[in-house]
């Protein structure tokens, strides 16, 4: 394209520097399937964790309910809640990917990987932080939480930007 005698590259024209390729249908279908599977299986896993935590309450497990275990209880509750919520986000992303075929490959792939990474690091960090609390503070695993949160922020930002382009 020319603009006042200056040659400029169109955003999606092949071979233009920085251009994003048009989405590949097979890759998009694979991502849809991946996020549906990830969502349903992780929802199952975090529901089982929730049932396990309820059982610890029911059986009055000391290592979980004692006053000295308050940090563990909080960290594991946060792991369960964030994990279950993120499982639902995977299902929502799968539906969005299915409905929005025009989401460019690079942005879509980064969002997908960021959501998967964040879905492991955020609840995993909370869970590991509760395994070995020290003097009322969570264990070192809690340092994974901000990294996971940052990855989730990237995934949601990219999806929101892509949704804005839909109209």
Image (cartoon, grey):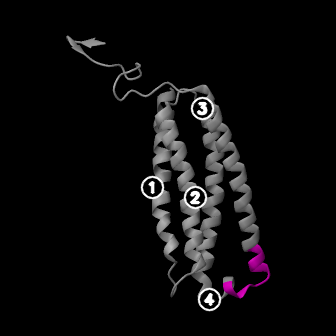
Q: Secondary structure at mark 3?
A: helix
Q: Which residue is mark 1?
A: 150
Question: Residue 120 has which mark?
Answer: 2
Asked if 119 appears above or below 162 in the picture, the reply is below
Left/right placement of residue 43 relative to residue 145 reads right
10 Å crowding of disc 4: few (<14), some (14-19), many (20+): few
Distance CA(mark 2)–CA(mark 4) = 29 Å
Give the SS element for disc 4: helix
**Nearest-to-viewer mark from 4 and 1:** 1
| Residue position for label 4 | 67
Asked whether the residues under the numbered discs 4 and 1 touch, taking CB atoms below 8 Å apart as contact, a structural biologist would say no
**Direction from residue 108 to residue 10 in the image, left or right:** left
SS label for mark 1: helix
The magenta segment? 54-63
Q: Residue at x 62, y 47 (%)?
A: 90
Q: Main secondary structure of the magenta part?
A: helix
**Does label 1 or label 2 sit earlier along the sequence?**
2
Residue at 54 percent of width and 60 percent of height: 121
> Which residue lies most toward the front here?
15
Q: In this view of the protein, can residue 95 be seen by the observer?
A: no
Mark nearer the N terminus (2 vs 4)? 4
Asked if 41 appears above or below 46 in the picture, the reply is above
Can you say whether 156 is above or below 78 in the image?
A: above
Sooner in the amino-acid sequence: mark 3 or mark 4: 3
């Amino acid at each position: 394209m020319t603009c006042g005698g200056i040659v400029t590259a169109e955003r999606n024209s092949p071979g233009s520097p920085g251009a994003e390729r048009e989405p590949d249908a097979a890759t998009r279908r694979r991502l849809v399937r991946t996020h549906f599977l990830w969502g349903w299986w992780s929802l199952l896993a975090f529901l089982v964790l929730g049932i396990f935590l309820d059982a610890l309450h029911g059986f009055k497990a000391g290592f979980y309910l004692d006053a000295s275990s308050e940090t563990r209880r909080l960290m594991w509750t946060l792991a369960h809640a964030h994990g279950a919520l993120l499982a639902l986000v995977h299902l929502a992303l799968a539906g969005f990917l299915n409905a929005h075929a025009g989401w460019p490959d690079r942005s879509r792939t980064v969002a997908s990987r960021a959501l998967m990474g964040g879905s492991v690091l955020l609840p995993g960090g909370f869970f590991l932080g509760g395994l070995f609390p020290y003097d009322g503070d969570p264990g070192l695993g809690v340092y994974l939480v901000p990294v996971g949160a940052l990855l989730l922020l990237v995934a949601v930002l990219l999806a929101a930007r892509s949704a804005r382009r839909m109209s």
